[in-house]
Structures are given as C-alpha cells and as structure tokens.
Image: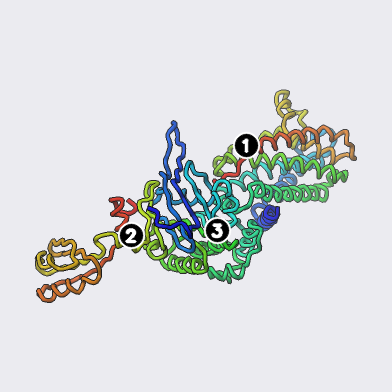
Amino acid sequence: MQSAYQLFLANLKIFYRNSQGFYWTILMPSIIYIALSVLPIGAFLTKGIDYPSFLLPGIVAMSIMQTGIYGLAYWMVDLKSQGIIKRFLVTPIRSVDIILGIVSSRIIVVLVEVLSLTLVGVIFFNARFAGNFFSIFIISILGAGIFLLAGLLISNYAKTYDTAAPVTSAIGLPLTFLGNIFFPIDSLPHILKIVAKILPTTYLADGLRQSYLYAFDFQKISKDILILAVWLVFMSGLTVWLFKLKED
Amino acid sequence: MEISNGVNDVISVKNLIKTYPLAKGKTLNALNGISFNVEKDEIFGILGPNGAGKTTTLEIIEGLKHQTAGQVTVLGFDNIRQTNEIKKRIGVQLQSSDYFPHLNLGELLDLFASLYRQTANRTYLLGLVDLKEKEHEVVKNLSGGQKQRFTIATSLVNMPAILFLDEPTTGLDPHARREMWKLIKNINSRGTTIVMTTHYMEEAEFLCNKVAIMDSGKILKIAEPKKLIEDLSHTTQIAFFTSEPCDENLFKNLPGVIKIFSRYPKTILEIKSLDHISAVLNILKTGNINFSGFTLKTASLEDVYLNLTGREFGE
C-alpha cells in the first residue's frame, strides 16, 4: 500500500504541474458550461428550470465521464507506450498497487472538477445548489468508479493514441449526447430513449441534478444510486475478468 | 559450454526455451535451449546482433516474461515461483523506458525507492552518477548520457545484488559511452554483479569478465573475452605496403608466422603473437625492402564473431 500511496501522490503532483492536463480537465468543462449557459439554446427543453441550473449537474456528469474514458485511457496508453509501466513491473510493486495509485489520484481530480464547476455555476450563473454535499459526493464517486474502470479497460486494448481515439469516441459520444447531459432524455426520439435509459451517464446526471436542484430526498435519488451501483459492480467484474496490466 | 563451478553462481540458466505464437499456427523460436551461469561480482556480457535473443533472455531472468521451457534461478530463487523475491534483489535498466513527466530527479528516485518500500539516498545515488546538481531538474532537460546515467541511479535505489543493463550505451556519443563504462566498472567494484547486453564488441571486450556470444536464439560460445580472442589462430595481423612486389618466401620460415598474403602493393601477415613483430621488421630491414603504412591489428571479438558465425557482425 505504501507503494500505491506514493504512486497516488506522484500522479497528483504530475496532474497539478501539467498545465495542459489542467486545461483540458478543469478549465475546458467550465468553458463549455459558460458558453452553453450564455447561449439561450436548450432552455426551452428544461421545463421551467433555468438552463444554467439544469446544465450544471449535466456538465459535472460529463466531465466525470471524460476524466475516466478519455483522461485515464490516454494516460495509461501514454505510460505504456513510454515504457513507464514496464519499468514499474521490474520492481516488486504489485500490479494492483500500480492501478490503485493511478486510479485513486484520478478520483481526487474528479472531486476537484466537481467543486470547480459547481463554484463557476453558482458564482457566475447563480445556478441552483441545494447543498446536498453528501449525495453529490457519493454519486460522483460511483460515476468516477464506473468511468475510470472503463478507461482502464480501453487502455487494455489500445497500444497507441491512434487505436484509443476511435474507441473513446465511440463510447464517449453516445454517453455525452444521449446521456441526459445537455437536455432531458424525454425529448429524444423513442428508439434513442431506450438506448439512453441504459447509459450510466443518464443516471449520473439525473442523480446529480436531483441533488443540485432539490432538497435531499432519498426516494428521488435511490433509483439513480442503485443503477449506478449495478453499473459499478458490472464494470468491476469486467475489469477483474479482462484487465491485465501489460508491459506494452 | 559452461565455465563455472557453480559455487559462486548468482544466476543459473538451464536449457531455456522461449517460443512466441505467430499467425496460422506457426511459432517463432526466440531462444533455443540456452544455458549459462553468472558468477558473483563479475560483469557478464551477452553479445549479439539485434534479434539474437539477448533482451528476451534478460526479461525472463528479470521476471518480466516466462519461459516456454527450462529453468532459471537468480540468487537461489526460481524465476517463476519466486519472482518477487528476485525483483526485490535486482536492479534493472531497460533498453528503452521513460519517466513520469513533471517530476524532478530527486522525486523520481523517492518514487522508485518507495516501490521497494525503501527510502532513496538521493545524495549518494545522484553523486554516484555525477548528477548531484541536477536533483531538481526534470528528465527532459537532461542530455542522452545524463539520462542514461540517471536510469542507472534509479536501478540502484534498492542497492541490488545484481544489476541488469540492456544495451546501456546504445545511442550515446563516444564520450558519454566512455563515461558510462567508467560508471559500470565503478558500480561493479562496489560489489554489484552486472549482467549486460550489448552489440558493441569493444564494450564487451573492455567491460566484461565473461561473454556469451548469441545468435538466432543460441549461445555460440561463452568464455572470457581474452580467451575467446586467444583461441583464434590469427591473433595478430600485420599489414604494410611495399614499393616493389614482395616475395612471400622471405617470411615463410619465420617462427610465429601463420599466414602470408601478398598482392602488390599490400602484404598481410598473420602472426601468433606480438612477440613476433620484431622478426618481421628485421626481415624488412635486412632485405632492404622499402615499405610504408605499417599497421598492426590484434584480433577482436568481432573476429571471434566472424569466426563463429561465418558472417560479419550486424550482417
């Protein structure tokens, strides 16, 4: 565990010293949120809720998803292609500790993202925030777990950016555009609605939205938490079954 | 083939076979039953061209890969059943590997030491590789030689009993290569056994106590470099140019002369040892032969390789 903790600290250091990573992970979601909140698009879909308030939890869900599927997958591909994973594998550190160290640092990144986006929404757009810190925390962690595991699995099969990029796009795009992020899934055509009801982002965004917009009501978020937990168990099983930390 | 009595062995490799599956049910035999032993405190070199199986051999010993058949023990531990015990006690410099970006050398050493549950002695390690003043620099600001020396420092964080170096000087300029040789000798003199691969003959000749010459997944010969060279009949070659055609018979009865090859204006003599040079010079002098461009070439590992494989190194 000591090794995993040191890897966790090293990864956090790398993250906050890397201006590009900071830009894409923290700043970019805020810029998208600001841009879409300023424009009047989407407002007519949101049933009386002002669009910045509707959008904020959606963008938070999107950035959680992206940190896993794009951020972690590309980082792992990078580490493998540069021989860094192989270098670790000739030391006594266990593969599970390497993964723990890298993945747990990304959970901190997710929490920083959630906090910074929330502050942008509340301060600049007076977005609704009911103050349900605990449920936001739990739902964010569940979402981070699902998508970080997805990122790990993608990196299992992609050796380079070129092979990782189409896979991340194929998974990331439907999760973004059908996943309850920019508009409610009720406004989707029937067939797409069926797809949307399977996607974890649908429940991540919904759970966050209930927690951001309304006073705490476990009844309202229990279905989201349950489905996210099922997704997390499924992804964990898939990871244990399929993921192997390979040298290249 | 083995030249060890087994008492001081720190590595023992027996009948190692490694095959990789290829498409359509075919297989690639990377290692074809190689055997060798490495003794404590020696610098053992594995020499061979690209694709000879050098890196595969090292990676099996280091626990990165598993063999298809054969036995490997390192410091008495089995490479498959006791991989972790081996990893704790060895240091490894891979042929190519990078480092986490945005971390300085000191932080990277701390990180690597933590992988062994140890604390890095930054001052000692960076001092050893002459990078003390670079402690707060990041790797991308180092030159090729400095980066390679730093790689050696990271592989010493656990004070290993055996250090594996996979082509440690590939891509370095001649000065950086000499610096690296000094460093390797220095580490070895402090009691670390070194196993290294190289495709530079002069490197193996200069550094290694024992050399295994590999080609196509086989070990062709193992011996001390000096012994390998001495075993060749043509240990020294003399060449010179003459102003007039030179009569081969002049040298025929000289003791120590093995072969004479004369094609005007060049004459080449192969002699048993350096002791026979004076006799050759004497004949040239007494016979009033006007000669120039006198060169002397002792046999090298390159000649050994040529002799063993029948082709030039790297062909």
Residue toward you, B310 or A110? B310
Residue B168 percent location from the top left of the image: 47, 59
Query: In whole angstroms, how far apart are the C-alphas of marks 3 and 2?
Result: 29 Å
| Residue located beneath label 3 in the image | B91
Residue toward you, A119 or B107? B107
User: Given the image, what chain letter belongs to the residue carrying mark 3?
Assistant: B
Look at the picture and state if B240 lies above or below A173.
below
Look at the picture and state if B117 lies above or below B129.
above
| Residue located beneath label 2 in the image | B228
From the viewer's perspective, tell me whether residue B140 is left or right of residue A98: left
Mark 3 or mark 1, which is nearer to you?
3
Q: Which mark is residue A242?
A: 1
Query: In whole angstroms, how far apart are the C-alphas of marks 1 and 2?
Result: 50 Å
Residue at the image point whose x is 41% and y is 44% from the top: B32
Q: Residues within 10 Å of mark 1 (few under 14, many from 20)?
A: few
Q: Amino acid at mark 1?
A: Leu
Query: In whole angstroms, how far apart are the C-alphas of marks 3 and 1?
Result: 30 Å
Residue at the image point whose x is 31% and y is 50% from the top: B309
User: Given the image, what chain letter belongs to the residue carrying mark 2?
Assistant: B
Q: Amino acid at mark 3?
A: Gly
